[in-house]
Image (cartoon, rainbow, N blue to C red):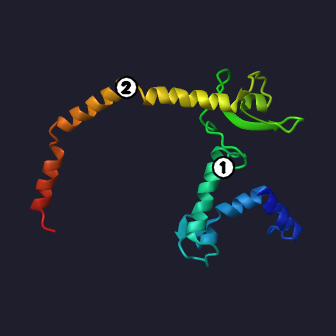
Amino acid sequence: MKDMARKFNARGIRTKRGTEISINTITSMLHNRKYIGEYQFRDAVIPNGVPAVVSQELFDRVQERMAANKKAPAKHKAEDEYLLTTKLFCGKCKSMMVGKSGTSRNETTYRYYKCLGVKYRRGRDKKTVKKLWIEDYVIGQIRKIIFDDELIERLADTVLKIQGKDNTVIPLFFLRCSAMSF
């Protein structure tokens, strides 16, 4: 969005009030339903009330992307995927931990998760956690749970019990349907 605003301003394109295009202007434009032809006056919404500039499909894709970015803004910016973004929280302050990376003098890239409480200097002192270590640990714990033979046996027994019960709802449904003429 910064690049888009910069390009509009470089071309001399301004808002209707004559001010420079900002990130907020771009955000407002991307949410504006007039671009898909929807006109709104007070509480009345008129589909195809104005000519559409973009397709509904493109507009919907942009909305999905913006919703995802709102939840985890830097998720698509990272070179490496941080599996635990939006799922990992600090054990000290309960703030979300986000993926970060840094490059040393010898050009080695280090990837880790950092507490937002520390990142925004809210007086927290939580150390960063190495990305590879924490992701491997979490995946290992998930595997222990998923591949637990005892758990699988209990689930299988529960499914068999449910299948063995008489289902009285479905036969009634078919009786009612057969009584109706379509």
Task: Answer yes or no: is residue 114 visible.
Answer: yes
Q: In the rendered image, which residue does mark 1 sit on? A: 69
Helix, strand, or loop for circle 2?
A: helix
Please state if 4 lies on the left or on the right of 143 as rendered: right
Give the residue drawn at x 17%, y 48%: 170
Q: Is residue 54 above or below residue 122?
A: below
* Residue lying furthest bottom: 51
Residue, x 59% and y 72% (percent of image)?
Answer: 55
Which of these two is toward me, 87 or 26?
87
Q: Which residue is rendered at x = 60% and y = 67% of the image? A: 58
Question: How many residues crowd mark 2 within 10 Å: few (<14), some (14–19), many (20+)?
Answer: few
Task: Name the element at disc 1.
Answer: helix
Q: Earlier in the sequence, mark 1 or mark 2?
A: 1
Instruction: Give the quadrant of the N terminus.
Output: bottom right
From the viewer's perspective, is 20 left or right of 49?
right
Instruction: Please tell me whether mark 1 or mark 2 is closer to you in this view.
Output: 2
Q: Is residue 135 above or below residue 51?
A: above
Residue 35 location in percent, x, y? Answer: 64, 70
Residue type for callout 2:
Asp
**Residue 30 vs residue 136, the one in the foreground:** 136
Q: Quadrant of the C terminus?
A: bottom left
Residue 86 x %, y %: 62, 38
Q: Amino acid at mark 1?
A: Asn
Left or right, residue 137 beside residue 145: right
Horizontal and vertical percent position of residue 150:
35, 23
Say which quarter of the image contains residue 164.
top left
User: In 3D space, how far apart are the residues under numbered discs 1 and 2 (Cα atoms)?
Assistant: 39 Å
Work out whether 103 lies above or below 148.
Answer: below
Disc number for residue 149: 2
- Check contact, mark 1 vs mark 2: CB within 8 A: no
